[in-house]
Image (cartoon, coloured by chain):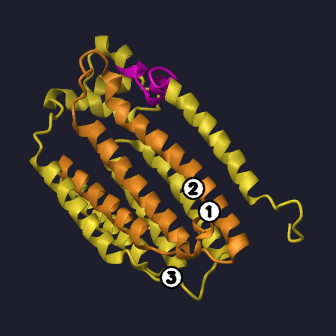
Amino acid sequence: MLFQDIVFWILSVMAVGAALGVVLVPDLFRAALLLAVVFVAVAGFFILLSAEFLAVVQVLIYVGAIAILIIFAVMLTRDVKHGNLPNRLQIPAVVFATLLLATLVTVAVDTEWNFLPAEQQERVDLVQTGAVTTLTGDLLTESGVAVEDQPEVQKAGLADLLIGDFVLPFEAVSVLLLAALIGALALVRPSPGSRRG
Amino acid sequence: MSFEAFLIVSAILFCIGLYGSLARRNVLAVLMSIELMFNGVNVTLVAISKYLAPAALHDDISSVLTGQVFAVFIITVAAAEIALGLGIVFAMYRTNETVDLTEATELKH
């Protein structure tokens, strides 16, 4: 547990420091690189929270695709003259963000959370870590899952939820991705009359 | 490494992103801040799904994965958002030769 605490604090300092850098560093290219650091730190949080699949997805999509896309955009639209300037709303924005942070922290600390019962924690960890793997019977027996519970644990998984309980949002998100893709292509297509295309 | 610690870190990430999206002039900086907010929310959802007991826990053990499913959807929507957002940024750069949000005033007049 101590090791996990140390990792948690390292990741927290990394995430918060890099996030502050993203919004405060004047050079946008450096800000984009710091954003990739935040994404990696969040992937570390996911591993600490036994969401290994999400950690992999985070690295693939955020670090691998989104950060690279943003870096490309920064280089293609380089605005050397202005950099990353604040606008007139800076002071209201600081006040608003600080107030919201104070509210969120108060709520997080004061609420009586309904925690998982300790005797369930091990089974839950197993289901969450094994979200995308096929857990073999031997592994489950070693982890202390009773034989009659094993089919239930093996069946549970992200994929079962995605195409079971959440099939409607899943399909909606698929259509949304397709629409976004076509929309992005239509947006950047050169207009018919332009010579630069 | 308590549940509250995760909530506080994700709240900090979210508020930094909120400040950035309100107070920056460069449209790419605003997009990056929005990604920060998405990440803060994702950490909250996954922390909740690890530490808190869902109401349906006794009927269905897989309900402890609900938070992760939500995070998957948020990541997908973030990918769609960034693709469209960068498309708009390039269209704006092509017409205005700038990515400064305070100069994007065509719809005002």
- Disc number placed over residue B93 in the picture, else none: none
Question: Which chain is the one coloured orange?
Answer: B
Crowd tier of the residue under label 1, counting other residues whose Cα lies within 10 Å: few below 14, some 14–19, many 20 or above: some
Chain holding disc 2: B
Magenta portion: prevailing SS class: helix
Name the residue carrying label 3. A27
Looking at this view, is A35 or B94 the one in front? B94
Distance from disc 3 to disc 1, alpha carbons, whole Å, reads 17 Å
> Which amino acid type is marked by label 3?
Asp
**Residue at (66% x, 68% y) in the render:** B92
Give the farthest residue toward the top: A148
Q: On the rendered structure, is B42 left or right of A66?
A: left
User: In the rendering, which numbered label is found on residue B82?
Assistant: 2
Task: Give the camera-side residue of A109 and B19.
Answer: B19
**Image coords of residue A139 (percent x, y):** 36, 27
Which residue is drawn at the image coordinates 21% and 54% (left, top)? A104
- The residue tagged with tag 1: helix, strand or loop? helix
Residues packed near mark 2 inside 10 Å, few (<14), some (14 to 19) or many (20 plus): many
Residues at circles 2 and 3 in contact by the CB criterion of under 8 Å: no
* Spot occupied by residue A171 in the image (x, y as percentages of width and height): 57, 29
The residue lying toward the viewer, choosing from A193 and A124, is A193
Q: Chain of mark 3?
A: A
Q: Is residue A151 magenta?
A: no
Between discs 3 and 1, the one toward the N terminus: 3
- Residues in magenta, as a range: A153-167
Instruction: Report the residue at 69% width, 53% height from top.
Output: A184
Q: Residue furthest front?
A: B109
Q: Colour of chain A?
A: yellow
Residue kind at label 2, given as amino acid type: Ile
Tag 2 and tag 1, C-beta contact below 8 Å:
yes
Point out the residue furthest to the bottom here.
A81
Residue designated by label 1:
A69
